[in-house]
Amino acid sequence: MQNKYTYSFKEGNKDMVEILGGKGANLSEMVSLGIPVPSGFVITTESCALYYKNNKSLPSNIKKQIDKELSLLEKKIKKKLGDKNDPLLVSVRSGASVSMPGMMDTILNLGLNDISVKALVKKTSNRRFVLDSYRRFIQMYANVVEGIESKNFEKILDEIKKTKELISDTEFSQDDLEVIIEKFKKVYKKYTKKTFPQSPKDQLYRAIEAVFESWNNDRAISYRKMHGIDNLLGTAVTVQEMVFGNMGEDCATGVCFSRNPSTGENEFYGEYLVNAQGEDVVAGVRTPIEIKMLKTQNPKIYKQLVEIKDKLETHYKDIQDMEFTIEKNKLYFLQTRNGKTTAKARIKIVVDLVDEGILTKQEALLKIDPNSLNQLLHKQFKQKDLEKNKPIAIGLAASPGASVGEIVFSAKDACEKKDLGRNVILVRKETSPEDIEGINSAVGILTSTGGMTSHAAVVARGMGKCCVCGCTKLNVDEEKKIIYVGEEKFFEGDVISVDGSTGKVYKGEIAVEEVQFSKDFLTIMKWSDEFRKMRVRTNADTKNDAKKALELGAEGIGLCRTEHMFFEQKRLKLIRELILADNSKERQVVIEKLLPLQTKDFLDLFDVMKGLSVNVRLLDPPLHEFLPTEDNEIKKLAKQLNVTQNKLKQKILNLSEVNPMLGHRGCRLGITYPEITKMQVRAMLKALKEKKCNLEIMVPLVGSVEEFKNQKEIILEIAREQKINNLKIGVMIEVPRAGIKADEIALEAEFFSFGTNDLTQMTLGFSRDDIGKFIQEYLDKGIYKADPFVSLDQTGVGELIKIAVDKAKKVKQNIKLGICGEHGGDPSSIEFFHNTGLDYVSCSPFRVPIARLVCAQATIKQNLQLA
Amino acid sequence: MQNKYTYSFKEGNKDMVEILGGKGANLSEMVSLGIPVPSGFVITTESCALYYKNNKSLPSNIKKQIDKELSLLEKKIKKKLGDKNDPLLVSVRSGASVSMPGMMDTILNLGLNDISVKALVKKTSNRRFVLDSYRRFIQMYANVVEGIESKNFEKILDEIKKTKELISDTEFSQDDLEVIIEKFKKVYKKYTKKTFPQSPKDQLYRAIEAVFESWNNDRAISYRKMHGIDNLLGTAVTVQEMVFGNMGEDCATGVCFSRNPSTGENEFYGEYLVNAQGEDVVAGVRTPIEIKMLKTQNPKIYKQLVEIKDKLETHYKDIQDMEFTIEKNKLYFLQTRNGKTTAKARIKIVVDLVDEGILTKQEALLKIDPNSLNQLLHKQFKQKDLEKNKPIAIGLAASPGASVGEIVFSAKDACEKKDLGRNVILVRKETSPEDIEGINSAVGILTSTGGMTSHAAVVARGMGKCCVCGCTKLNVDEEKKIIYVGEEKFFEGDVISVDGSTGKVYKGEIAVEEVQFSKDFLTIMKWSDEFRKMRVRTNADTKNDAKKALELGAEGIGLCRTEHMFFEQKRLKLIRELILADNSKERQVVIEKLLPLQTKDFLDLFDVMKGLSVNVRLLDPPLHEFLPTEDNEIKKLAKQLNVTQNKLKQKILNLSEVNPMLGHRGCRLGITYPEITKMQVRAMLKALKEKKCNLEIMVPLVGSVEEFKNQKEIILEIAREQKINNLKIGVMIEVPRAGIKADEIALEAEFFSFGTNDLTQMTLGFSRDDIGKFIQEYLDKGIYKADPFVSLDQTGVGELIKIAVDKAKKVKQNIKLGICGEHGGDPSSIEFFHNTGLDYVSCSPFRVPIARLVCAQATIKQNLQLA
């Protein structure tokens, strides 16, 4: 059989999206449902690919199939393209299998020429409408097919309007339109050296080619890149009989939703315009009327509309976003698709659809975009207030939420003002570990440099605090305490509003909506928990983090970074003394002081966790991260520690590293300074004796089983000392070698937790602090599809994780496997972890609900595949 | 059958080294060859392990077997331990399967007590000898078995010598010795609260236990750690009848070699002492006599000695190192083992042994330690001159050779003095890429910090230049131009001698021996080439490197680091302009200037290589490596480039990276600055058209096939422009992800070269610049057996290489595979590469002969295993 490149609407259905595109498939589906749709056919996406293969020209076999479809269409509706009595007009529209709104081209009213115009005038008795359609078609065709810029035509319209003192296009007289058509034809000739094509068949072929061509225009290419769409053949083309909502008062055109897309209420929602074209609804020249008005204006049509929208919603099992036209009291549907909604609405809709028996719980869960939940978990600016304000700058939406406060420029100022009961926003070039208390005191963080995984971003996300990073338009002078934004200046104490969900920064105060979990949200979470197989833990370092995470449904702590306990002022001083100690005796003195503090930290944390699992990681960061780098900070510290500034500088220099990420950190610290491991474990175990929990001790940055054995022996020594048995001791898998040697390590370890941040850094050789210099270019060129620190590099790092899981399970079937990198909160990564067979993910508290949902979705998808 | 823990010499043989230890196995072997050996038996290494398992006490079943062996021995030689008429005396010696000279304990004259002393006096009629033996035995036993410090006994001897004004121990009268024995017994009682044991059986058990105990003394443990010995059960113990070379003028003791171990000449070599014990030969109290003198002194014994040494050499197929004793005109052999020799001697010996029909060529090649060839490839200090000097400091032997020159402290001074015809040694804290010309001008390099893979070390090895690194005892003040070494100071112009083969630094000039390849050396190389399967290439960046490598047998270039072409002053200026250019137009101007220079570089290189393979790597290092870091250098450069110092500083700061090793480098440069790739490829191809070679273009730091495809497309574009076909384009595999994705990459690449330096850094998460802070502790604790940058981490990084090779060959059976990291010159790593199926190794020029030998050894070993 010959390959089939065209399908009449009757031949298609909604599952043929891949070859017919979304538009073509849904039009076909509606036809099969008996819904009135103007007749037409689809040219497949494959044809688009063949067009490019054939040196950008329609292959003759495809042309033949088009001819055949066209004559079937003409026969069916008894009109002929270009006919001198009853001419057929068609629209030629693009439509890929994934929606790319407005990116590609469309031509309407095709089939008009000097002859068909006359015929149509005769038939419609509406000369003005026909002439107006012709001039629009010439302009559209010239622009889309020949690439003649629209301004060449607009100029002509403007001139006539000026001469005749007209305000709007609708005021052109029929004579004006005749003149305009002639002038348009001249412009066409000037640019193409040809007369405007009078053969409707030629018009059609050229229009189809032009739509194919628009698949690869700059906008479309960059849209696909931005959305990671890279596996499509091309766009399909829909050729469909024109229907007109602008042929008189018995005509109309409208857009409607089967439910309210903003609140999710089950009410018919939409608007329409009498005697108008679709464009007019969008353009906003006239104010459309609420759809409910149609009930009185035209009860018959309204009833039909309601019946159809109900039918479509039940059929598609989702809120529908539809376009319709009424031509001379006859209703036509021109499009239907699943509607875009707010997160709140979506949740209400799917829960309602389950109640209505239209969706199963599983189907309902799959219909929620997990990332959209972010909107529900964080404060938001009131939409209406937001619309009144223009942002002064836009940065990276690093940690969602809405915050309003006075500008401060230092951690110290943040703490002081907070103590006075003021809301402050900490504004810095970038933050450092020394700022941790300041970050904690601020309601929001704003930095001018730094990316999605910069210090500020990571810490803020961990705290669930609103943060915008890399806001390069800001020029922050921390010393003079001024922000320059273009011509404007902002000073300490000035109020700004920061939107961590969009990256936008506003001058002054914008009203904020508080978070309230709806009943529907809780239902969705309950259902998620019913279906998911993976457990969800949280990364939490303090009792406050832990409390928040428990509220959001965390089932334990997957990563407690003990170093974060050291950043508080008093401890920072002690840890600095520890680092700068000259010998192990001096070190021991400091250790003794640190022990009770750390014991208290653990006690507080275990208390909150009430018997749940708590995974505590031993000290991880390079020690020099605790030391100041700036001269005046060094001066202060020298005084505090009673050493000369030079000596201190020398020590800091000695500790500095060329590649700290690959340096003296992780278990390398615990091996060279066993007293630190001992102190930390002793603190944990002392706390454990008072407050029970399922403690897991994790050794970081293990590359060789010998490293782990060394630390395990020290941990067991303290366990014997503290008379504690059955301690769970495991490994953070974050060095590639650990993945390769996972079998050897698994024999010794009771659990693995994949530290995907570092694992990504080392497996890819990407320093996350330094990729700023090339990552954008890498994404633009498609070398990586996504920032590998945001979404797991599944085929590279993921493959290594798979290797590790296989090796580990081969020697220890029941080894507990988790993941605690930033990827633990990323939907596509979570799905990967589910499919790889991990037992749990751990993520920052505010990602916990998202993870719960994704875990359920992953299970449901897997079951569907198995079925 | 019951487990066997003891073997009489008759039961053993040389292949039982693992259970009998080297000493026991060789004594057994000599017995089976009919060579006179004092009778005895061996307690196995397994017994040592069981001793420890049994809470450090001899298990009774082992004791029983010892008893049985002892009574068989007593029966055989018709003497009894502790007998009152004809008492047996034995030695109890340690002996592991790997020689650990002097690390463990020995007890002689065991069996002496108050009764057997009397019997022995009667039998030998030599009361003085017997008493002297007794007092020695008490001291040795007390020390080894009871841990009583020797100084407690020495004090007594010293007092008597003082009172009696004696000079040497040999002057003690028999009465003195009686007194000494009584006093010694008192010391023993004081420390142990027991009388000196009179039961010879107890003495024997305790002595055996003590030898087992010495397996785990501090010295032995650290020796094993140092030599990476970690798979042994323990030491064996040899119990052997005592024979005495000190019972009169018809007695003697000696040490001899079957050939000259220093020159390799086939001549009997050694020395002996009449009426003396083994210790006396070693202690050097009396000057021993050349072995040849024995020919006249005792022709019968001499003849027997020569016959036996010939027999042993032919039997062991190697030069023998033997110990013998003559007791009352009867010859006994106490030990034989393969002799340690100089590299020169070893080569001569094995070539001679092949000529003599004793060895096959394959056996001969296996008998050479590849690293020892270093001695033959580099200048050496004359041994005699060396012995007269004490080093002022010792650092890391980073690049072998001997150099003498005046101290200079800067690259500039080095160049200037060199131009005046002076030999200079460049002394720095550490070197940087800016010093490259200075390094080239110096005869030797000495740094106070930096490890075996520091900049100085790597560059010096590449140039075959003598280098000592990490000489921490030196305090180098580069500004004041002074080196402080303890109390001493050295100034610019002072002459020092630096030994890159030992790491030693000497004051003043030491005479140097020039390199001359012996006929034997060339024979060994010829044989190596006959057997090896892997090809050997070299890492060479300049025509001089390449020339040297060809002389040393390289078959091509495996890595030409194009960035090294940029370090010469004029180019450095250009490359800096390139880096600091504000836009691509400015960049293009510099590129145009660089093109002819790089073309010339390649032309020179290809000319030398005469059609052989040349693998050129595209620009690799982070660009900021080309920029100055110190203020006055920045000032100079700012002036040169005509920009303000501040602007330059800002630019340098912008380019600086937190983890440069994981930053903007490798193909990431070529992707973001395609003009650099284009220029480099254009230069190569222009050169290629004039001078043919088998050019391979290598893309560095590839982690994703998309990166490679990007660069390959650019390379092919230039190839089309230059009308060159069949270009070989491949990948440097040095990012772990590339190993994991090797199949995908292999489909696009014609060859892989494993860059094991970076691959080690990223797979282990070790920055080679920073591991100094913990690597020593890691080696001490046995976490890694060797520095993974010196010897490949075969089970980790090596496993990843195996995965990559398997994946690559699965999709492209004939893909060419090589390795070009520092490991390409390391013997055990080369053997691993051979076994993994690589096609070639590439190493620095001076490692080429070593690699040739190791490649042959690997092939021979593999064939032996297959057979």
Image (cartoon, coloured by chain):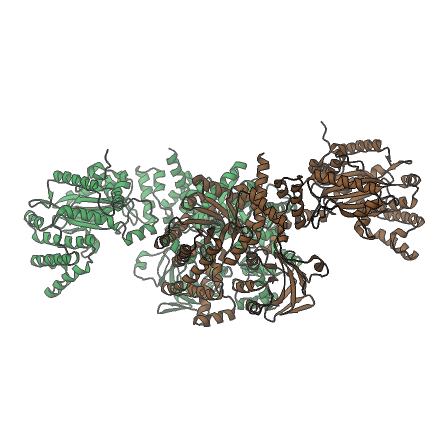
Chain colours: A brown, B green
Tell me the quadrant of the picture where the C terminus of chain B can be found.
Answer: top left
Residue at image point 18% right, 44% down: B240
Q: Nearer the viewer, residue B720 or A404?
A: A404
In the displayed structure, would residue A774 be above or below residue A584? above
In which quarter of the view is residue B54 placed?
top left
Q: Position of residue B544 (x, y in %)?
A: 49, 53
Q: Nearer the viewer, residue A514 or A48?
A: A514
In the displayed structure, would residue B793 be above or below residue A11? below
Q: Position of residue B438 (x, y in %)?
A: 48, 61
Q: Nearer the viewer, residue A443 or B814?
A: A443
Q: Nearer the viewer, residue A695 or A89?
A: A695
Q: Position of residue B273 (x, y in %)?
A: 17, 51
Q: Is residue A789 left or right of residue A7?
A: left
Q: Position of residue A202 (x, y in %)?
A: 83, 38
In the displayed structure, would residue B45 be above or below residue B419? above
Residue at image point 19% right, 48% down: B207
Q: Is residue A659 visible?
A: no
Q: Give the number of callouts.
A: 0
Q: Is residue B21 left or right of residue A183?
A: left
Residue reaching furthest top?
Answer: A1
